Amino acid sequence: MSYSESRSPTSVTPAFKQSRLWLHARNSWLGERVRALRRCLHELVALIRFNHPEVPQVQELCKSILTLQDIHSTAEEAGEDLEAPIFLLSTGWRAGSTLLQRVLVTDPDLLLWGEPLAEMSLVSRLTEMVSLSISDRNLALWKRQPALKSVPLAETWIANLYPSAEDFRSALRAVFDRWLCKPARDEGFARWGFKEVRMGAAEAVFLNWIYPNAKFLVISRHPYDCYRSLADSGWGHVYDRYPNVIVDSAAAFAWHWNRIAVSWFELSSEFPLKRIKFEDMIAGRVDFRELESWLGIKINETAALSASVGKTATRATLNWYERLIISHEAAPGMCALGYSKRP
C-alpha cells in the first residue's frame, strides 16, 4: 500500500544507486515522473487482476440462525442477560475508528480492545460457519432426534446426534467471554468490547446473536481520505485476512470499504446500531450526550479529541487514477452514505 521504497537493514544497495548521478536523477522531475508512472501502472494492473473475495451475507446468516432449533428469541434472552458489550466497527482503515475508540474509553469503566487478532478473521470465519451451518438433510435428522433419555441409545440410530442449538450458541459465546470479557474484568473494567476495521453487517448479526444486549457503532469516512491516509502511511500492505486477502491497491481498498458500507443498509431499523461520520465528529456535529445515554457510559470527548496522536496523510489529494478507481469500485457505498465523487 505504501508508495515509499522499503529496504531490509541487511540489504545491499547496488553501487549505481549510491552514485551522485543516480541520486540527482531520482530527485529530479524525471525521477518523480517515473515513480508516478510506476504507481499508476501498479494501481491499474491491480484493478484488472482484482478478484472479489467471498464474504458472509446477512440474508444467509439470518436464515441459518432462524433454522437452528431450540434457540431462544433475542427478546427473551435480553431480559436475563446482563452482558452488554460495545462493538465499534469501521468502513475499513483510517476512517477514525481509533479516535472514536479513544473517545469512548474516556469512561474509566470501559475497555475496548483494539482489533484483537484481526488478521485471523475469527469473527468473520465463525460468521461464515454459522451462515452455511447445516444441510437440509442433516437439519431434518436433527429435528427428528428423540430425547436422549427416551430411547435405548445402543439400539437407536445415533450416527447423527447433536446437543441443542442453544448449547452451540453458548459455546461460541464462551470463546469471547473467556478471550475478551474475562481479561477486561480481571483488569477492573465493568464494560468491554472491541474496535474493528474488517467487519460488516453479517459479523454484527453474528455478534448480536451471541450477545443480544450488544450495542454497535459504525464510523465511516470519505474513501478518498481513507485511502490517501493509508497509502501515505508507510505501513506497506495490510491484510483483510492473512495471508490470502491482501489490501495493496486502490481497487482492493475501495472494494473492502464499499462492501462494509453497503452491508449496514441490509439491517432492519430495529438493529441496535448507530452510524457516525468522521467528518461530523471532528466538526463537532456528534451529540455525545445522546451517544453516552444510548451506550450507558460517561464520555469526556474533549480530552480525546484534543489529543494529537498521529497523522499519516502527506498528500493534499489523491492522483486522478486513484480517484477514478475508488469512485468506480465504491460507488454504491459512497451514494448510500452521501459522499461526493468529486475531490
Image (cartoon, helix red, strand yellow):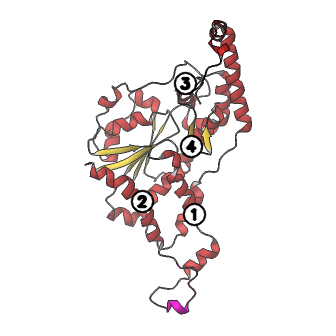
Name the residue tied to disc 4: 240
- Three-letter amino acid code at disc 2? Val
In the rendered structure, are the residues bearing label 1 and label 3 in contact, judged by CB atoms less than 8 Å apart?
no
- Three-letter amino acid code at disc 1? Lys
**Rendering coords of residue 10 (x, y %):** 55, 27
Quadrant housing the N terminus:
top right
Q: Is residue 277 above or below residue 57?
A: above
Instruction: Name the front one of labels 1 and 2.
Output: 2
Residue at x-position 34% and y-position 46%: 295
Q: Is residue 219 above or below residue 187?
A: above
The dominant secondary structure in magenta is loop
Quarter-of-image position of residue 246: top right
* Upstream in sequence: badge 2 or badge 4: 2
Quarter-of-image position of residue 232: top right
Left or right for 2, reference 36 = left
Q: Secondary structure at mark 4?
A: strand
Residues drawn in magenta: 150-161
Residue at x-position 55% and y-position 90%: 156
Residue 267 seen in this snapshot: no
- Three-letter amino acid code at disc 4? Asp
Name the residue tied to disc 1: 63
Quarter-of-image position of residue 135: bottom right
Residue 175 disc label:
2
